[in-house]
Image: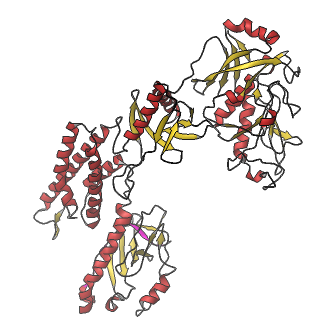
Amino acid sequence: MPSSLTTLPANATVEQLQEVLKSKKPNCAGISASYSCGNHDSVPQYSGSIVSVAAGDDIAMNSMVLSVISIDGSGNGEGLIKVPMRCDDSLNNIKLGVTLSGIKVAEGGCVVAGRAELSGVSASVLTDKQRATLEKVYTAYNQVLDLAYENAGAIAETINNLKDFIQKAKDFSKNYKGGNTDAKKAKIYEEYAKNAQKVLFNSKNLPDTIRADLESKIIAAQPAWDFFKTGNKCNGTSSGKGGPNFEDYTDECEAFSAAIIAEMDAMEAAEGSFTCNCSPIISECSPIKDILSQIKEANSSKKESISISKVDNKDKLSNDTDWVSALNGIDIGGKCFKLSLEFKFSGDKIDLKPNRYKETKDGFDLVDDKDNTLLSINILNESGQVKYLKQAVLKKYLGFEEFEEEEGILTIKIFSDGKVIKYVPKNIQAEYKKQYDSGKGKTYPVQYIYFDIKGNAKNLGKYSYFLIDNPKQDARWSKKKVIDLIDIRTIKQVGYKIHLDASQNSSERYYLNPCALGSVIGACIELGYTDIDFRGFSKSDGTPNPSSTHYNGYYGDFGYFCKDQSRHSLSLKYQYETGKYYGWSQMDEERQNKFNDALHKFGWDGFWSWKYDGKFLNHSTQLTNHDHHLHTKYYYKCLNDNCTEYEK
């Protein structure tokens, strides 16, 4: 309920009033009152909660305090203006009757929407001096109403984009009633319209016929704007209701509304003509299209490097306000793309390799040799299958290298439901079976294909695996005489980022069984994390040094996820940072458990870890010296050919 303002004696001074109001000053999400006659703070739009108001409550419209006599649920009722300020001694105790219309009040008693108009002021209660100064008070009162309109009425009509503006302008013209509020709204809407039209006309891509139609509609609507800006009412003359011109005014306003609606329709048609051809209202997109064309042409001609300059993606319709956001309509392969570019490099220009990229959930990143992102190309306002298809179109348009599924080679198929299959085509089956008897020292091709939840296949690339003698023939590490390994450093990462921990440089544990690598890739694609801390699987000869369990590329270590995504060493022994380790309070427990779940889903039956805060991570048990990393347990998914599928 709004707080009542303290009652002051009739002879209260301004200083006394200011002292009392110091703690009572309404402050509604930035809407505040100065309580000095005629001076009003500049106020932003209020977007907070609205409270109910009842008879007897005091509410404030900047420097004017209103006492509510009656009010309904729609904010309509009656009240009195209380004048507690010594702007004029003779008016210190005067109370003026007001009619309340659509009043909305924020916590603290500040009126943030609606109107209050003088009503029932009896001249008989006023002295000559009071009559002489009433005009001054009423002027100040109207200033309050103007402020309430400017900051809680018109600006409450926040314009989010051109489409939103067109609809609001049409509604305004149809619902125009006249008065100061509507006059101010008309000025704001006309200003926005002129700014938008200026941008439209400045574009060379605006068709001549649409340009001419818009020009004629603007001229035809000008008298309507001029009338609406006066605030004159449509239902009578300025002398009051009815009157000799009542019908004429009504007809004229309907005609004015029709003219403005026609102008808005013409603007909508003009903007619509740019839907897939760089809409200037949305943003000046030629720099973005130029950069995309530059990448496309460079990849087409096999250029090693191109120079990219930063451009400003924002387009303003006024000097001090971003009226619209930067979205860009570009026609690529017959599809309309809304795109944004993010420049991640320092300085104004950079040389980058046009075909060194990685896919992201929103599009593509161009990266340097260390996989640091230099330029992000993002597809906006799309999701699911639509984004997937558009991403494929954009990839082809830009000329990014696309891996084509190759027939006749070993294929690791990874499915979003966690299944991993080692698929052996007919033409290589005889050779494939021989290689595990006599293939030591040889290398063979393998390709990885990922199938999303809708069955869409994504080729992750063609690589090479090699064969070595099995250093640990055992059911847990494979009973085969010869085992196959692949170097994780050769894999092109798509939509995730595995960081190869520097501590592995000495042990060189970069080698995984090809199926185990498929399981890791599946878990990583499912989560899309970019701070995965790889601590090693096996050495190139299949041995585990320094661990006793990391044989044959089936079992590996990962660092724990940190809340700050720094990949800092973290130990579950400690709650807080201790020495070189973060403590478990700095672990991102939610993401860590999701990673455990994903690895479990794609291939491992559990993990060795450490108990912390009285609990374990998902699928984990305690093992000495595993407080600082996660160790995968039994690889059930594809050990001993239990996931191999032969083409029939």
Q: Is 17 rendered above or below residue 280? A: below
Q: Position of residue 530 (x, y in %)?
A: 64, 40
Residue in the picture at 33% in, 43% down:
280
The reply to whether residue 381 is visible in this rendering is no
Q: Is 477 rendered above or below residue 565? A: above
Question: Is 518 or 613 nearer to us in this picture?
Answer: 518
Q: Residue furthest left?
A: 244
Residue 144 appears in which quarter of the rendering?
bottom left
Residue in the picture at 28% in, 55% down:
172
Residue 455 in magenta?
no
The reply to whether residue 435 is visible in this rendering is yes
Q: Which contiguous range is marked in magenta?
A: 108-122
Residue 599 appears in which quarter of the rendering?
top right
Q: Position of residue 240 (x, y in %)?
A: 17, 70
Q: Does residue 387 appear to the left or right of 514 in the view shown? A: left
Residue in the picture at 25% in, 92% down:
129
Question: Is 468 or 53 nearer to us in this picture?
Answer: 468
Residue 109 in magenta?
yes
- Total number of numbered discs in the rendering: 0
Q: Is 475 rendered above or below residue 127? A: above
Q: Position of residue 55 (x, y in %)?
A: 43, 74
Q: Position of residue 304 (x, y in %)?
A: 52, 29
Q: Does residue 141 appear to the left or right of 296 in the view shown? A: left
Residue 579 appears in which quarter of the rendering?
bottom right
Q: Does residue 25 appear to the left or right of 539 in the view shown? A: left
Q: Is 53 rendered above or below residue 128? A: above
Question: Is 83 or 72 nearer to us in this picture?
Answer: 83
Question: Is 167 or 326 nearer to us in this picture?
Answer: 326
